[in-house]
Image (cartoon, grey):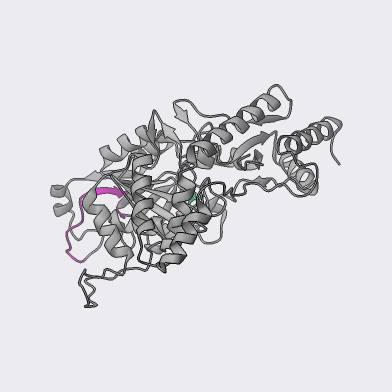
Amino acid sequence: MYSQTENTLFAETVQFIRQTFGQSEGTIPLHAPVFRGNEKKYLGECIDSTYVSSVGQFVDRFEEAMALFTGAVKAVVCVNGTNALHLALQLAGVERDEEVITQPLTFVATVNAIAYCAAHPVFVDVDSDTMGLSPTALKSWLEQNASIETAEKAEQNKGKEQGQGKARKPGTYNKNTGRRIAAVVPMHTFGHPCRIDEIAEICRQYHIELIEDAAESLGSYYKGQHTGTFGKIGVLSFNGNKILTTGGGGMLLFRDEALAKKAKHISTQAKVTHPWAFVHDEIGYNYRMPNINAALGLAQLEQIEGFLAAKRQLANAYKQFFAGKPGIKYVEEPKDCRSNFWLNAVLLDGLRQRDAFLEYTNRQGVMTRPAWELMHRLPMFNKAQCGDLSHAEWIADRLVNISSSVL
Ligand SMILES: *Cc1c(COP(=O)(O)O)cnc(C)c1O
């Protein structure tokens, strides 16, 4: 079933992972959370205060600490990363029947959030080294498919596509569909930053809003700047399998204080502040993270430097172990990046080899996972417009994530 070289390679890999994690038997998970700080203390304080839900000091403390850590002007908590993405797109002005460009190699949440806005995803390829949205592919797709419409031109074109004599918003329009391209959402895959400064520059040229899905990249920097702080809004996730967890949770990172204030308002049912009256001035959401989750998050954030150091050490050990091994290639930190190494990854020689490796390792109790099924192949999104996606397809056929917990 496996070739002789595969047998040796796979067995050595399993042995190395078991040895590294000091676990000679039982299942080794892909990414387990660790609680070695003030988690129990803060949770206890939270319960003792009775403020476990939508009011309490841990939310403010967690937001302030996270803004400080990432260098964002303001941070606003959410119930999870998916609804943080939804809120971010809405705050960026994405409306029904507009288009949002993203990458096909991502977790489904990125694209679901676009669908929640009744907008249409457009898939553009990733770079093969960063595995995140490629500025080269983005630029070439826009050059071929989009045209910039100034306020003046929008006035002249008024009613042309929509037929209602309504002035079109100035911005960039897709020449094939006539729809406005409202936002670009790159994702920093497995914690490796994409070439976000070049993407930001393209977005500026085309007047398209930039929303970063930094759900996997807390603690990752591009040219010294924290991911999630390059665009209008950045989104983090604190799900149980992420580098830091609040049980479930998410966060929005802002450069603009007024927009952060608006996010807080909309995420708390758009309730007008008043000592007793219940008045709401627009349609809002119940997207605010409860205080008890923020208590857990604050305790976790206090340990982030240790988590990052441990993950870097593990990454170095993998890099050394896989160096020169035929048939497998460790995915390294891209140029100009400081990665959090959220999920380590290797590339096998092809689909058959990938599946053989997945089968062997999982049967041995060492959890490994392939990349997500590409978004343009899922039934909900398989009619979406796509650029050339050959890098994403190449990666998806070969990539496997391997054990990455903090040691
Ligand atoms: C985890 C993740 C999210 C958000 O997930 P939640 O579970 O809703 O917090 C969004 N995008 C990507 C790429 C993710 O990995």
For the view shown, which residue lies furthest in the bottom direction?
277
Q: Is residue 116 above or below residue 259?
A: below
Question: What segment is highlighted magenta in the picture?
Answer: 164-180
The reply to whether residue 194 is visible in this rendering is no
The reply to whether residue 183 is visible in this rendering is yes
Q: Is the magenta stretch mostly helix, strand or loop?
A: loop
Residue 242 is situated, as x and y percent measured from the top left of the image, at 53, 48
Residue 373 is situated, as x and y percent measured from the top left of the image, at 60, 51
**Res. 208 image quadrant:** top left
Taking depth in this image into account, of 207 and 369 the one nearest to the observer is: 369
Determine whether, in the image, residue 356 is placed left or right of residue 390. Answer: right
Taking depth in this image into account, of 330 and 304 the one nearest to the observer is: 304
Q: Quadrant of the C terminus?
A: top right
Residue 259 is situated, as x and y percent measured from the top left of the image, at 24, 53
Which residue: 55% across, 41% down?
A: 342
State yes or no: residue 253 in magenta: no
Q: Is residue 266 above or below residue 244?
A: below
Taking depth in this image into account, of 96 and 53 the one nearest to the observer is: 53
Which residue: 60% across, 41% down?
A: 406
Which residue: 21% across, 52% down?
A: 258
Determine whether, in the image, residue 124 is placed left or right of residue 327. Answer: left
Q: In which quarter of the image is the N terminus?
A: top right
Q: Is residue 318 above or below residue 108?
A: above
Residue 223 is situated, as x and y percent measured from the top left of the image, at 39, 28
Determine whether, in the image, residue 152 is placed left or right of residue 68. Answer: left
- Total number of numbered discs in the rendering: 0
